[in-house]
Image: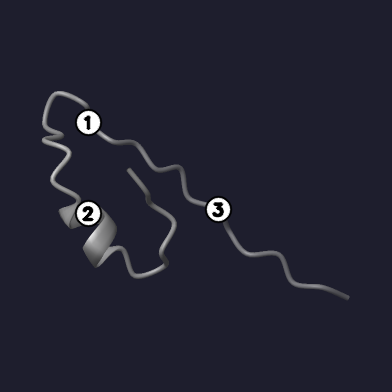
Amino acid sequence: MSKSKNKAKIEINQAWCKSCGICVDFCPTDVLEL
């Protein structure tokens, strides 16, 4: 039997985003990209 991982919904607030990439650098699961 395989275990399924819970998937979280990721929402980026575009009004706050500066495209600096800090969220990508600090993402512990490497799921973000610009």
Q: Nearer the viewer, residue 23 or 21?
A: 21
In this rendering, would 22 be left or right of 24? left
What residue does disc 1 label? 13
Tell me which residue sits at (63%, 64%) in the image: 5
Tell me which residue sits at (15%, 34%) in the image: 17
Q: Does label 3 or label 1 sit earlier along the sequence?
A: 3
Q: Does label 1 or label 2 sit earlier along the sequence?
A: 1
What residue does disc 3 label? 7
Picture quarter with the C terminus: top left
- In the rendered image, the residue lying farthest to the right is 1
Instruction: Give the mark toward the camera: 1 or 2.
Output: 2
Instruction: Please say if 28 is above or below 15.
Output: below
Picture quarter with the N terminus: bottom right
- SS class, disc 2: helix
What is the three-letter code of the residue carrying label 3? Lys
Tell me which residue sits at (48%, 50%) in the image: 8
- SS class, disc 1: loop
Q: Residue 9: percent from the left, percent from the top?
A: 45, 42
What residue does disc 2 label? 23
In this rendering, would 10 be left or right of 23? right
Q: How is the image coloured?
A: one colour
